[in-house]
Image (spheres, coloured by chain):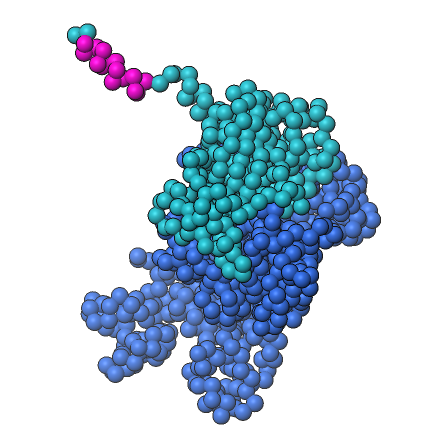
Chain colours: A blue, B cyan
Amino acid sequence: MTGTPTRTLLLWCPDWPVLAAEIVDGVPATGPVAVLHANRVVACSERARAEGVRRGLRKREAQGRCPQLTVVDHDPGRDARAFEPVVAAVEEVAAGVEVVRPGACALAARGPSRYLGGEEAAAERIIEHIAQTCAVESQVGIADGVFAAGLAARAGRVVPVGGTPGFLAGLPVEALGRPALADLLRRLGVRTLGDFAALPGGDVLARFGFDGALAHRLAAGRDHRPLAVRQPPADLAVTTDYDEPIDRVDAAAFAARTLAEQLHDRLAAHGLACTRLGIEAVTAHGQELHRVWRHDGLLTAAAIADRVRWQLDGWLSGSSGRSGARPARPTAGIIRLRLVPDGVLAQAGLQPGLWGERGEERERAHRALSRVQGILGPEAVVTAVLGGGRSPADQVRLVPWGDERLPARPGAPSEVGRSRDAGPTDRTGQPDRTGRSGGTGRSGGTGRSGGVVRSALPPWPGRLPPPAPAVVLPAPLAATVHDAVGEPVGVSARLLLTAAPARLVVGTAQPVEIVGWAGPWPVDERWWAPAEACRRARFQVCLADGTALLLAVESGQWLVEAIYD
Amino acid sequence: MAGRMVVGSAALAGLVRPASADPAGGHRMLPVAPELTGLLPNRGLRRGSTIAIATGQPRHSGGTSLVLALLAEASRAGSWCAVVGVPTFGAGAAAEAGIALDRLALVPQPGPDWPTVVAALIDGVDVVVAAVPAAVSASIANRLAARARQRGSVLVPYGRWDGADVTLQVVRGVWEGLGQGRGRLRRREVTVAARGRGAAARPKEIKVWLPGDGLTRVIPRSATVPAASVTGRSTAGRLRPVPAVPTPDAPPHHRPLTLVGPP
């Protein structure tokens, strides 16, 4: 590439990791602070530097030089988060900002300097604006190319046009930011960037490789890389104000439809689609109601309208029938509606399935299920997602139709759906006798099936092997178990039965004879959290009428958890 | 020449099928698991038909497993299914039976809108399983059956239902694998009876493993019953290759589990 490098203005905030720690975590940067990564100092505050703390020192050495040093862990995410308002503030003054790294951002100097009347004036204006809006100290350097501008910013200089090679020539080779190369150059007798730039380019490439050749170009002030300017995110939210407060459901539905179409059109104009949707409403009395809806696919205009209508319906009618989590009915009508798309991604079009999986049948089923949701409410139509867990009820999460299908706990259930396709898997295993969660015991039953690699998912030792019960009771039924002479059967702390179970009484029903039983299979879950701890022993019993049940004993109480129907 | 023609047509006879039977029937038919085909008049779930599943003679003797087995093959083939009014539905068992859970919608609490919800689902879902509430009038039942016939869905009422094309009922279920203090539930031998109208008028009865262990699914009629169900010494559960009939290690007339009627 030929031509002169872009005239670049670089804004640099000194000791940014320290400042970020102050902004995010509230560590006062005026005191001696050092940010450490892998036991080495990455950045330190002015006070700490005055005490002799330098970059690259070990923690113990730094604390030895400055005993009252506050040590903060390095967190690149925190640095980037804290820098975001600074970039936004720069964007208020000038357009086209590239974030070089957290703590430094570059922009083309030509626009702001012409608009603000000179490069020095632009630099002063930007520094002042950032100091006022973000209360952050910064320095600005202007030179040809990002590399030279970065070095100029450390000196707080404005390098005149064409003076960049001369400015760079006086700097030491360490300024390249490549310690290994700088060390080698120094031993070869090349001490400044000017010396390095004077070497023939072909020889540098042959001796130091591509990275060396790039460093050579930078040292000579030929930094041709254009700025990778970030695009400020487009404002996609749609808002409508209503002169007449909406307090009827049909009016709300009508409003929802128009707003949904607006949002969909705006997203489509940007070639985007959203997977989550935030709906905010403000009532005449100033109440604000907000809810985020998730969706497993891309939200179409009709789907957006449905969700807005359901939510407004729920609020305005106050029908907190099935889910008690709905907010109370607002005291006044809605005067402002706002739809905020979330989880926005590029709309590349949906790929239809080859064998009709996503074809007409899916559309038909979606319409029917949405209709049922319209009749009964969005939470009345659910799909089941299998996840990890030890009891049959724990493994299943019911998600409302249309939401993302995510399990409640990670972990694949035992050979689900593959029982016929899989080869000869081991099915002889008993439930793990030591089903203590958090332990490192081998997984019982299914975990030993040879050849099945399930590394990323937790194994859930102590889970019952298949077959799974076909009837899972939402709330377990209380029961009592008696032995042959009519005494209640209990389980000791050492998992010993007081007697063999012989009769089962569920609720107030007649006693039924137990003809087969197995257990106890203990499970001790979340013993580290007393509020959620659960210690049970489980049994499978077969009754004289052919019914098979899954029983559990919890603190002396027998419960019917599930029925093998 | 004539001889060659005869030979040629005889060879073709095996290849040529009646033109009307397969395309129409295959299009209007949802598949079921091969062991259940004998119970249904068209060896599958005919679209538009009503196939009722009556609750078993002792309750909880396999009705839900029969529903799952009936849906499994259709769901695996890509059909959409819905289950209305079963709050105790065991999704784990459904997945083990082979039902695709992402194409299975559950409406656990339809409430008083039961007929509306079932009718709406019949419009869009291929197989609708509906637990029948206590009071469903004959006119509502007829209307739903007619709607299913018109829309080409299969209605599977679970409970008491008059006028179904076929009614399946579990008459006996015997678990095996559980002993006195040892073993675990492995599989259940279930006797399913079918009665119905028209082509299905003749009562039929078969025995299947529900849930099975994936290896032996159908129990041939001539087979003697494996009798070790409560002794925990079942050899059947450990048979690894494909033994169609587990050899009994007890006399065939010895039936250790006797039915004692509803609890």
At which x and y percent is residue B154?
Answer: 56, 29
Image quarter (top left, top right, bottom left or bottom right) of the C terminus of chain A? top right
The main secondary structure of the magenta stretch is helix
Q: Is residue A249 left or right of residue B28?
A: right
Q: Quadrant of residue A22?
A: bottom right
The residue at 49%/75% (across/down) is A74
- Marker count (numbered): 0
Locate residue B261, reporting x and y percent: 64, 42
Which residue ends up furthest to the top in the rendered image? B2
Which is nearer the eye, A61 or A208? A61
Q: Is residue A431 visible?
A: yes
Camera-side residue: B248 or A226?
B248
Q: Is residue B5 magenta?
A: yes
Describe residue A12's horizontal placement relative to residue A450 as left or right.
Answer: right
Q: Which image quadrant for residue A373?
A: top right
User: Residue A331 in the image: x percent, y percent?
Assistant: 83, 49
Stretch of the chain drawn in magenta: B3-16
At a point 54% along the width and 87% down the height, the residue shown is: A69
